[in-house]
Amino acid sequence: MKQPTVTDDAADNPGKDRNFVTALGRGLELLRAFGASEEYLGNAELSRRTGIPRPTVSRLTYTLTLLGYLQHNQHLEKYRLGAGVLALGYRYLANMGIRDITRPHLQRLADATDCNVSLATADRTSMMYLETCHGSGPLIMRLEVGSRLPIATSAIGRAWLCGISAERRQQVMGELQETHRDDWPRIEAGINKSLTEYEQHGFCLSEGDWQREISAVAVPLVLEDGAEVMAINCGGSGLRLTHEILVENLGPRLIEVTERIQGEFEPARMPR
C-alpha cells in the first residue's frame, strides 16, 4: 500500500485530498517551525516561517498551548515547545526498541575506530539522529541525538536513499530537487555516485560533501522487509579518515555491524 505523504499542495488545497485535515497539518507545521537553537518564537515569526495567516496562527498557538505542546511566555508574548512534544518523542523512541538493540553495537564500533557512529531516520529532507555513540579520540564529531544532517549530501542520507524502494526514492529526489534547485545538478550527481557505490560495495561515502573537513561511510538499515528503513554511519575528521580507510576498513565493518543489528531486531519483534 502506498504511504501518504504531506505536501504543500495538499496543505494549501485540501480539496485535492479529501482525507487531509488542514487544521491538524497546520498545527504540526507550527511545531516544526521551532529550530534546535531557538527557544521562543512569536506568532508573527511563526506565520512568516510557515506561510500560515497570522490570525490562524494565533488560534493554533492558543490551542497547542492548552494541550501542552507549547508554552506561552506572557512577558515576551512568545511561545516555546512544551513538554507534550518531548513526551511524544520519548514515546516514539521507546516504542521502536531499535535504540536498545543498536546502542551496544554502535558504541563498540565507535570505541574501536575512534569515530562517531550513529543511527538516523529520515524526516523530510533531513536525517535525524536517534542514537549516537562517540569514540575517545581528539578529532571526534560531537553530534547528539536529535542532530540533523541533509539527506542529499551526507553519507547517512544517501545510504537511506539506497535502502528505500525505487518508487519512494523517485519521490524524495523530486522533493530534494525542489529544495536545492540551483545546486541540484551537482547534488544529483553525488547521489547517483552513492547509488553506484552501494551497488558495488554495500555502503555509501561522503568525503567533504556535507562538511569539507568531514568524511563518513554509511549503510542502510532495512527492517521488517522494508517497512522501516533507517541508516547507520561512521565518520570523523577527513584528515584521519582517508578514502582507503573508508573503503577497506570502516565500510566492511559497518556492514557487519548492520547485519548483526538486523539479526537481533527481527527475533525481538516476533510475537511470543
Image (spheres, rainbow, N blue to C red):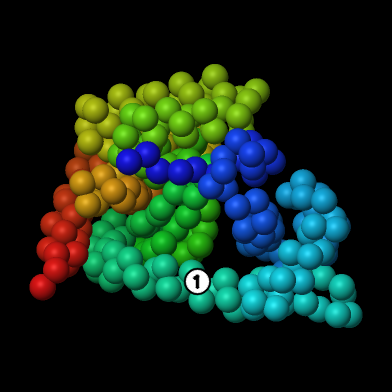
Query: Which quarter of the rendered picture does the C terminus lie within?
Result: bottom left
Q: Residue at x 23, y 63 (%)?
A: 105
Q: Nearer the viewer, residue 143 or 124?
A: 124
Q: Nearer the viewer, residue 164 or 160?
A: 164
Give left or right: position of 160 versus 223: right
In percent of width and height, residue 115 lies at 36, 56
Q: Residue at x 39, y 64 (%)?
A: 131
Q: Is residue 38 above or below residue 222?
A: below
Q: Residue at x 77, y 46 (%)?
A: 51
Q: Residue at x 47, y 65 (%)?
A: 145
Query: Which quarter of the rendered picture does the N terminus lie within?
Result: top left
Give left or right: position of 58 versus 199: right
Question: On the image, which quarter does residue 40 sit in?
Answer: bottom right
| Residue receiving disc 1 | 88
In percent of width and height, residue 196 lies at 30, 24
Q: Nearer the viewer, residue 74 or 55?
A: 55
In percent of width and height, residue 41 lies at 78, 64
Please rate how many residues cluster around mark 1, counting C-alpha atoms within 10 Å: few if below 14, some from 14 to 19, many from 20.
Answer: few
Residue 223 visible in the picture: yes
Give left or right: position of 241 versus 72: left
* Amino acid on which the number 1 mark rests in the picture: Leu
SS label for mark 1: helix
In percent of width and height, residue 265 lies at 19, 61
Give left or right: position of 49 versus 109: right
Residue 134 visible in the picture: no
